[in-house]
Amino acid sequence: MAFVQFKNVRIAGISAGVPKFVASNLTPSEDDGISSEYSPEAFVEATGVLERHVSNTLTTSDLCFEAAEKLISDLQWDKSEIEAIVFVSQTADYVLPATACILQDRLGLSRECYAEDVALGCSGWVYGLSNVVSLVSTGAIKKALLLAGDAKKRAKGSLDPLFGHAGTATAIEYSEGANGFKFHFGTDGSGYDAIIMPDGGSRNQVSADSFKLEEIEGKQMHRLQTHMKGMDVFSFGITTAPKSVKKLAERFEFNYLDADYVIFHQANMKMNNQIVKKLKLDPERVPSCMYRFGNTSSASIPLTIVTQLKGKFENRPTKFICCGFGVGLSWGTVAFVSDDNTVISELVEVEEPKEESKWM
Amino acid sequence: MKSLDEFVELFAEQFDETDASEITATTVFHDLEEWSSLIGLSVIAMVDEEFDVALKGDDVKNSVTVEDLYNNVKSKL
């Protein structure tokens, strides 16, 4: 049973960056890959995604960079004290090197810095959080950043109307006596092809055929786009997420119904409604941001906290349960109590870069 | 275990525009005008809730009639 607990560590703050541009699913453009199977209205009603912030220019690291700068400034952290950075994304800047290394330099962090990428999607914030808090919980590293999100893809293709772009930053700090974090993790690699970009890795190298369009679940897609077996993922989500929450509560002997907020990765409203119903949660305690931002992969949990909870909990101890699940198949749930001094930054809306000032 | 008739009724409830009288055990549901993968998600949710069975996409895709799907659910109980 993959349960872990880390103490003496706290979340100091959370921020999020999204592209300024908003694409509506009711008035799809040529860039949007809306399936011919149903109308835009039916899509919005069934998925719960009205619009998304997207960009053809800004990468995940651009969004995470802006979010991190804002958060560091709001926290008044001294950058020289940040000794670890973990970047969780499936849309890294380059196949290599790791984007975390690039961000160490771009953010002006010390060279005495632990930096790594984690290639996970919708479960990624919870996994990345476990990496960072495990590093910080001993007190050897006092301050660290978890950057998580997904944005501009590796290859041009139609935009999936379900997905939005976002990059988030979570600041983690050593704090003697803090309750810390309790985790449950799970993996089922037999479902590896439920969400997959078939080509571009070393299993199936990029070739001319990678760009041939095929019909995948009613949409024309090439093999450097993410293919998803929607019904399989839906079935996985509604069964696995509630079980993970229940297992965590059972192992650490708390009542999950006592949580002030239970935040799930948001993939599709129908799926999330079903999860809430199965756990008999009060919907008021289950905030969501997918109506305005879409499925934002590993950014969904921190983006929900920034856009839905800012001003509601920062000054009082608040019980959180957060659960991410998806591509892998991979899932993780964390329970923690935020303290009375959490900083939640205003959402950063990132402008398209001007041609001459484009970074790199 | 719910009966086939009850299953057909629950199945029909997942549609908004298709009248329940149009759906029977022998209906080839993929041919229904309103059928889409989004309705498929509702059917999977209904089966999870009513039968505690996790259907895969292929279970839905490979079933021809509503009765086929019922038998598939039954085989997983």
Image (spheres, coloured by chain):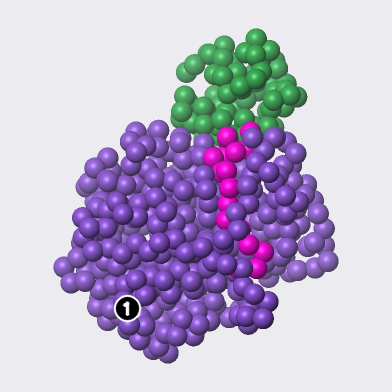
Can residue A82 be seen here? The reply is: yes
Q: Which residues are magenta?
A: A42-58
In the image, residue B24 lies in the stretch drawn in magenta: no
Mark 1, other Cα within 10 Å: few <14 / some 14–19 / many ≥20: few
What is the quadrant of residue A127 in the picture? bottom left
Is residue B32 shown left or right of residue B56? Answer: right
Q: Can you say whether A348 is above or below A76 in the image?
A: above
Closer-to-camera residue (A349/A49): A349
Shade of chain A as shown in the rendered figure: purple
Which chain letter goes with mark 1? A
What is the x, y in percent for residue A169?
42, 67
In the image, residue A57 lies in the stretch drawn in magenta: yes
Is residue A134 shown left or right of residue A66? Answer: left
The residue where tag 1 is placed is: A77
Q: Residue at x 58, y 47 (%)?
A: A51
Q: Quadrant of the C terminus of chain A?
A: bottom right
Shade of chain B as shown in the rendered figure: green
Q: Can you say whether A66 is above or below B11 in the image?
A: below
What is the x, y in percent for residue A110?
40, 88
Is residue B1 shown left or right of residue A336? Answer: right
What is the quadrant of residue A213 in the picture? bottom right
| Amino acid type indicated by mark 1 | Trp
Q: Residue at x 60, y 27 (%)?
A: B72
What is the x, y in percent for residue A83?
36, 82
Q: Can you say whether A269 is above or below A192 in the image?
A: above
Can residue A149 be seen here? The reply is: no
Q: Residue at x 43, y 38 (%)?
A: A275
Q: Residue at x 34, y 46 (%)?
A: A262
